[in-house]
Image: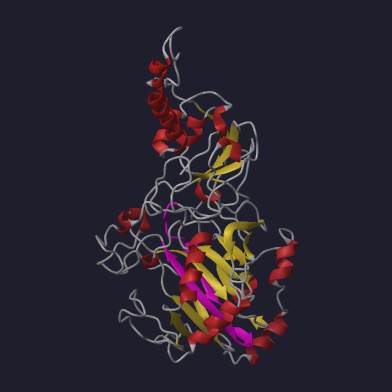
Amino acid sequence: MAGGKNKGRGKSSSVTPKKSNKTMAVGSKAAKDGQSSSSISYLVPILVVIGAILYKSQYGSSDEIAQSLNTTDPTAGHRKMKVPVGWQDGFYTIEDVVTVPSTHATLYPNGGNGPGETITIESDKDFLDLGRVYNDMGQIVQSRTHFKNGASLYLGPTRAGTHFQWPAVALGHRRPVSGVYGGDGKQVELETLTEPTENAASSEPRVFYVHNFLSAAEADEFVKFSTAPENPYKMAPSTGGTHKAWNQGGDGAVLTTRTSENAFDITTKQSFDVKKRAFRLLRMNGYQENMADGIQILRYKVGQAYVAHHDYFPTHQSKDFNWDPLSGGSNRFATIFLYLSDVSYGGQTVFPNCEKLSAEKSPELVERLGESPSASELKEFVSNAGLMEGSWEDNLIHKCYEKFAVPPRRGDAILFYSQRPDGLLDTNSLHGACPILNGTKWGANLWVWNACRYSQCSEDPMLPSEELTPALKAPFPGGS
């Protein structure tokens, strides 16, 4: 696969703390010898006030913490940052991993693209000056006792409309996602499938396999609701058209390059629960309905497929909305594609701009993702599926076995980003739905935007990122 591992030998730098020009009096001699007990009683309210000030300095706002921790004392890192109101369980580190505050780490940009930089962190103020930083587990690191010396840290988003992106770490790297569980209570796990790099033109897309995202019961319920009479957007031939949504009078033209059927779930409690789960997986704190499309449920029968495409809209899609995240606009940020059934043959999600995974790189992944059939077997599959030789479906199916592709497995999902960490739309996120060669494939699209989606902004549609809530609007101060 194109691109190397994210981690390499880092550059070295030192974060030098500024000299403190502020001191805090924390006590004084209470009284001279012979002072009366009545005089001492006057000190009680003063001591209470001093105690309140000290408490606030340790547990107050980020700015207050930064001021109170303006010290070069390397043992001061035991002080913990206050957990902001509304933070979700699992979003942040909560336990010490060392007793003596750490003093150096390797710092990577958001998403881990590019080489790391070795930094020295001599004080808590130095740590806070980094802004929000994450660990490999996608958790916000709260203090210097929450990581070991030499650990990898990742900068958070620095501009409104950009968000945290999971670092690849290494091909095949698998980690539990703290605070995120499927409908059956199993912890969701994230597995790295590609190796994105800092070069936008040649980088692989950022793709992860998501284990245990749905329970079997949840998968079955989506399938059932897609054809239910009470669903106003029940199963029908898949359509193409404009950026307008299913409930906004969008173009209903049936696509010749998408031969599946689709439905939408925009009303059930389960659909909202699953979308909230998606926000937690993406580490986007504070679910917002206007940042997510309705869940699109898909049915592919034998021979049906969807040509390679992007999930994001072109920046020139329409003049009544800013579609460019680089200039404060909004577009589809990430896709979580849910697999609602198993498929015997075909039905993979293929990324034609990404080279096929080799056994030399990851034999375990190759074995699990499946070996390619022989040329004669593939020809027989195509014939049995009723696909015409030379058709777009025939051309696509060859890509499905020549390029990087992920087979469906019920209850799991894949996560891929349509934007790079800086907000640039990622052309290499091009993907398609491979033709079904046997059986029926059920799946669902869950799209999350980087800000309010088209027609759902309450203020200026040219500046969607300005409407983000404080919990979702970068930049963030250190320790919050």
389 on left or right of 290: right
Against 454, residue 100 (above or below) is: above
Give whichever of 147, 418 is nearer the camera: 147
Q: Position of residue 77 (x, y in %)?
A: 56, 32
Residue at 57% over, 58% down: 179
Residue at 53% over, 71% down: 337
In the picture, residue 369 is in which quadrant? Answer: bottom right
Q: Position of residue 252 (x, y in %)?
A: 36, 85
Q: Which residues are magenta?
A: 422-449
Is residue 377 shown in magenta? no
Residue at 31% over, 66% down: 316
Against 393, residue 290 (above or below) is: above
Q: Position of residue 453 (x, y in %)?
A: 35, 66
Quadrant (top left, top right, bottom left, bottom right) of the N terminus? bottom right
Against 353, residue 378 (above or below) is: below
Q: Position of residue 307 (x, y in %)?
A: 50, 78
Residue that protrudes farthest toward the top in the picture: 33
Residue at 40% over, 54% down: 472
Give whichever of 126, 404 is nearer the camera: 126
Residue 320 appears in view: yes
In the picture, residue 248 is in which quadrant? Answer: bottom left
Instruction: Count up the numbered dots.
Output: 0
Residue 310 appears in view: no
213 on left or right of 163: right
Give whichever of 134, 70 is nearer the camera: 70
Query: What colouring style does the render use?
Result: secondary structure
Is residue 442 shown in magenta? yes
